[in-house]
Amino acid sequence: MAKSEEGCLSLPGIDLIVARDAEYLDYDGNKQVIESDLPLLSACIQHELDHTNGVLIYNKVSSLKRDMSVKKMEKYIDNHDIIKSFDPSHTCGDENCGEHHT
């Protein structure tokens, strides 16, 4: 099991130490190992597979670290005006633009 720092576009401003295993079980239940010249390939695949199962990196840490990361993310969102940028009624003010953004 290897630990490394991970970030996620779903959780802006959050980086957490996550433990990942290079082994996985194939469809037949046999242990397999991802061998690659890219050291983060296994972690990246697992990270994206976690998303398909509704798991985010903060689900892989203690409740204390999860609570701290949520507060940090809320602060990041407030400081970067992220909610405003997703508000469909918000426009940049350029009448020729037509895009909804800050």
Image (tube, rainbow, N blue to C red):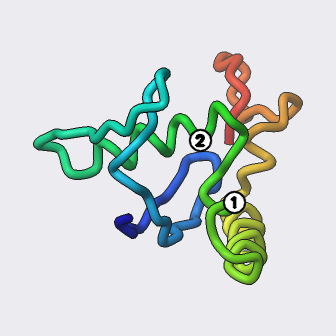
For this orientation, the residue located farthest to the right is: 89
For this orientation, the residue located farthest to the left is: 37
Task: Please identify the quadrant where the N terminus is shown.
Answer: bottom left
Q: State the residue in front, 22 or 74.
A: 22
Instruction: Report which residue position mark 2 lands on.
Output: 50
Q: Position of residue 90 (x, y in %)?
A: 82, 35
Disc assigned to residue 99: none
Disc assigned to residue 59: 1
Q: At x 84% / y 37%, what residue is drawn?
A: 87
Disc 2 residue type (three-letter): Asp
Q: Is residue 41 left or right of residue 37?
A: right
Q: Position of residue 61 (x, y in %)?
A: 63, 70
Q: At x 33% / y 50%, what residue is drawn?
A: 22
Q: At x 72% / y 51%, what residue is drawn?
A: 82
Q: State the residue in front, 100 or 3.
A: 3
Contact flag, marks 1 and 2 (Cβ < 8 Å)? yes
Residue 53: quadrant of the picture = top right
Q: State the residue in front, 77 or 100.
A: 77
Task: Please identify the quadrant where the C terminus is shown.
Answer: top right
- Above or below residue 11? Residue 97 is above
- Above or below residue 98? Residue 61 is below
Crowding near the residue tagged with mark 1, few <14, some 14–19, many ≥20 C-alpha atoms within 10 Å = few
How far is disc 1 from disc 2 in space, using C-alphas? 10 Å
Secondary element type, mark 1: helix
Crowding near the residue tagged with mark 2, few <14, some 14–19, many ≥20 C-alpha atoms within 10 Å = some
Q: State the residue in front, 9 or 25.
A: 25
- Above or below residue 38? Residue 80 is below
Q: Is residue 28 left or right of residue 80?
A: left
Disc 1 residue type (three-letter): Asn
